[in-house]
Amino acid sequence: MPIIIALISKNETLSNLFPILAKEKGFKEVIKPASFTKARKIALKLENEVDAIISRGTTGELIKKVANIPVVSIPITSMDIFRAIYKAKTISDNVAILSYKESRINKLDAQNMLKVKLTEFHFDSEYEIEDVILKVKEMGFKVVVGGMAVTDVAITHGLVGMTVETGEESLRQAVDEALNLIKVRRSELSRSARFKAILDSIGEGIIVTDQHKKIITSNPSSNKMFNKTYEKMLGKTIQSVIPNYNVDSVLKSGKPETKVIKDLHGLTIAASRLPIKVEDKIIGVVNTFEDVTKIQTLEQMIRKKIHEKGFIAKYHFDDILTSDKHMNDLKNLALLYSKTDSSILIQGESGTGKELFAQSIHNSSNRKSGPFVAINCAALPEQLLESELFGYEGGSFTGAKKEGKQGLFELAHNGTIFLDEIGELSKPLQARLLRVLEEKEIMHIGGDKIIPVNIRIISATNENLTNHIENGTFRKDLYYRLNVFNIKLPSLRDRGEDVGLLAVHFLKTLNTLNVDYEAIFKNLTPLLMTYNWPGNVRELSNIMERIALFIKNNESIKWGKILQMVMNKSEDRDVINLKVPLSGNIKDIIKNVEKQIIATTIIRCDNDHGKAAEKLGIGRTTLWRKLVN
């Protein structure tokens, strides 16, 4: 945008110099020959057409009083006046000097230096100039020194007018000052425009008051909230706009007050008050207002969006069924961990409920309103996993979406990300994950912008990560970052009391059976407890689904037969998995092992005790005695 500067002056010397400087300095010039009242009228018309106005002496000072753009007055120096007096001396040794309101030189010094008698006359407005000139003429003066407006009048009354000229250096100085003022003004206008745009775009209502509680600015949201136009709010005290609201305590204490709930105009408003301080002096208050109803609606919309994306945690600690003391202790420990934002590493065999714990931790944390994003690190190839986690810029690799894609770390912002099978991460991805943990920021693949993320990382593994560290496949520093808090989940075979409890629960959740669950629990539990459960709870759930199908279609089948049919795929009929208790003496341990062998053999013999005894090479009586004792 080109800079335009106007020169308002009747001085021909200045008018001739001004275009030369305009070309040299790179601005467009406007020249208007005028002074005093006429100059002020021209200045008012030029306000919206030029960036600054330059004028001389008295005219410049008068324009400053009416113009709303930068005005620079060309300085009239003592040397400029001395030069005019020196020229006047050639006409007469008795010289009259006319100036606006006050003297501009030391008269005594000028008289001594130039050997001339000087008499000063002053005027308060342009309308007095002629009267003063007539008085000067009556007093016998022949020559008058002053500005062009003065010398023009003097000449019309037959006197010699010696105009005080301004040199090129003074005009150049004025131009430079005008250019600097324009630069500062444009910067201020740009900053004000940005500030206003920001203020206008904010959904919260904002009202800024001064130290006298008067409103100095407001944004459209506040105008709409309180049903007042900006003009009607400006300059009013905030109490007159918002009844029963005051900022006295903030102005007095200098301390902010946040989220004060107020009932205003039938609205429930969350109001915050922040003091404005300059050099420890309170000069005003920023007041922000939020409609609580809108906040609640927005939160519901966000939660709905998160739900639609599937980034939610469905399970809570109450969903983790157990009667095992150790498992209950782990639930309490996990609940305690949930109250922090630190990383958690959950260890346990496949199917022990690691994600169930992760979701429960999220739903008990202060992040429960945020997203829960889960990903299996072993399910995707390295490059695809990297793009899923960190996102990418459009066209950053073959097959990338044109518009780019957000990564899961971004989508988990203000929530939790669950990284299952963390031990499968490649070393390069481990390094990038370490940066996320340390810096709380990510960068898209192919991008150059840092994106801050506020996430809590819960990771899980069914492997021994310390072995990976020793083998050099897992970073030690990452391990300690992930393992701030640790939960080790037991296998189902170590939770004997829970097998029957969970089995019946899985049957009930199918909602297709009309059976005696207590009888099922009594008959099925001893048989299920003889199995080793390599797939843990997940395997138990699958087997119970198969059992439910058999029960529904043929209830006459015996439990042993059913169990054999549904479990035969995972059980070698010539191999028995035993759970050997190491407590007690050797005699008790052997007795327990014998019972497990007999119970399993009976199941595999279709619950035929005679056949089982024969297979084991013992009599039926011996089999029975060993089973019940």
Image: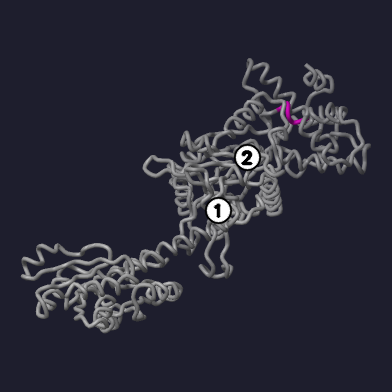
Q: Secondary structure at mark 1?
A: loop
* Above or below, 423 relative to 70: above
Q: Nearer the viewer, residue 341 or 20?
A: 20
Identify the residue under disc 2. 362
Q: Relative to residue 402, is residue 173 drawn left or right?
A: left
Identify the residue under disc 1. 234
Residues shaded magenta: 496-500
The three-letter code of the residue at mark 2 reads His
Q: Nearer the viewer, residue 172 or 506?
A: 172
Real-space Cα separation, disc 2 to disc 1, in angstroms: 47 Å
Q: Nearer the viewer, residue 232 or 253?
A: 232
Q: Position of residue 172 (x, y in %)?
A: 24, 74
Q: Of circles 2 and 1, which is in front?
A: 1
> Could you tell me which residue is drawn at 82 percent across and 41 percent down?
565
Marks counted in the figure total 2
Q: Position of residue 7 (x, y in %)?
A: 33, 77
The three-letter code of the residue at mark 1 reads Leu
